[in-house]
Image (tube, rainbow, N blue to C red):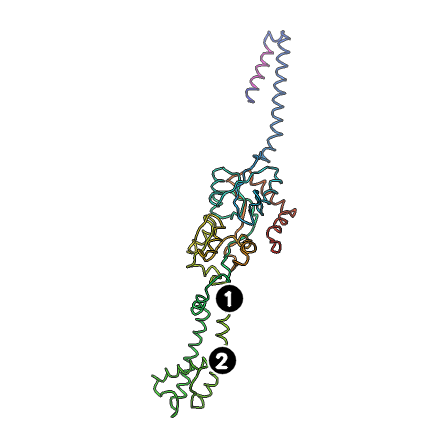
Amino acid sequence: MINAIATRFRQLLAGRKTPIGRYDRKNKTRRSLALYTCIGLIGGILALLLMTSPGLAQKPQLQQPLLVATRVIPPFVLPNKGELSGFSIDLWRNIANQIGVESKFIEYSSVPELLSAIKDNKANLGISAISITAERQENFDFSLPIFAGGLQIMVRNSETNDNAFPNIFQLFFSASLLQVIGVALVLIVVAAHIIWLSERNHKDGMIPKSYFPGIFKACWWSAATLATQADEMPKGVLGRLVGIIWMFIGVLFAAYFTASATTSLTVQQLQGDIRSIDDLPGKVVATTAGSTAATYMREHKISVLEVNKIDQAYNALQTKKADAVVFDAPVLLFYAANEGKGKVQIVGSILREESYGIILPNNSPYRKPINQALLNLKENGTYQSLYDKWFDAEKS
């Protein structure tokens, strides 16, 4: 364009040097007017480009309304009389006000459907309780974290479990009881040898002189005394002294065993037979299909019952089709404090910490303004107000 203008300018100057041009004042005036007009137009266009280009580069033109994919997952997204509410919904509405856009929610039933909608450009972004993972980061962009959570275990309330006999059966094979039995066997063998050595040479001793079967008789006496059921006492002085000490040990052992068994049964009654991730192998665990919880269960070789909606996982737990539910901790806590109150309980600690974010297509122009708005909401206290509204324990 600049070269064309320069060529035209040289042509006009050359025209002024022609013989006719020197004497044709009318043509000279026209050419001068055309020249100044071209220069003025070019200058105006360049000035306009310089003024508008930086603004366009800094702030992209946002499409309106934005299509926001979501899914019902209390307390992040809840249906409320034909409209949506919840922590994620309220947070997005505040973000939309910050960046000055209108939006429309589109509901999907599962995480895979939501991700597919964003990947196929059926939605501009997604917000709910969407975990930020390395695998998802390869195909999508995420905003700054909007919530810090993690996976946790939920089981049926102990009052709804009819498993007294399985608990007692399990007690006999528990690690704590096996440890007590091991200690008792060592003590029985040690005491039996002391009694055999002290009684074998006594003429009226209760233990035969030979090692076999004398040691078996000594072990029987040692075990019976430890259980406070001895029917015979040693005859020698050393044997009687050992017997008295052993009877006191037997009383202490019986009290310790009773306390351990009672504690184990109480814990099982309160928590059932699932208390941590180590208790899940061999159990059926319900969670939603395509979730990070399902991936986590498969990685740990745990049988997974995958359902489309978390409500179906709750139902599977209540109908005993599943032994536990593993899902996002805040979602399970909200259910246990509301609809599932008295029916379920949360056990164990957080299995794996996770952060939730707003998911967008790769290279989305909305990521930067969304992050800026999210930071503003955290700085001005709006985010904390929304958090207290939906996750305050007393209000929930």
Which kind of residue does numbered mark 2 sit on?
Answer: Val
343 in relation to 260, above or below: above
Q: Is residue 151 left or right of residue 202?
A: right
Reading the image, the residue beneath label 2 is: 251
Q: Give the distance between the C-alpha atoms of the residues marked 1 and 2, in whole angstroms.
A: 25 Å
Across and down, in percent, residue 193 comes to 40, 83
Q: Main secondary structure of the magenta part?
A: helix
Residue 165's image quarter?
bottom left
96 in relation to 213, above or below: above
167 in relation to 36, above or below: below
Reading the image, the residue beneath label 1 is: 267
Q: Secondary structure at mark 1?
A: helix
- Range covered by the magenta-colored residues: 6-17
Q: Earlier in the sequence, mark 1 or mark 2?
A: 2
Residue 229's image quarter?
bottom left
Q: Residues within 10 Å of mark 1 (few under 14, many from 20)?
A: few
Across and down, in percent, residue 126 comes to 53, 42
14 in relation to 101, above or below: above
Q: Is residue 183 left or right of residue 51?
A: left
Quarter holding the N terminus is: top right
Magenta highlight on residue 16 = yes
Across and down, in percent, residue 221 comes to 41, 83
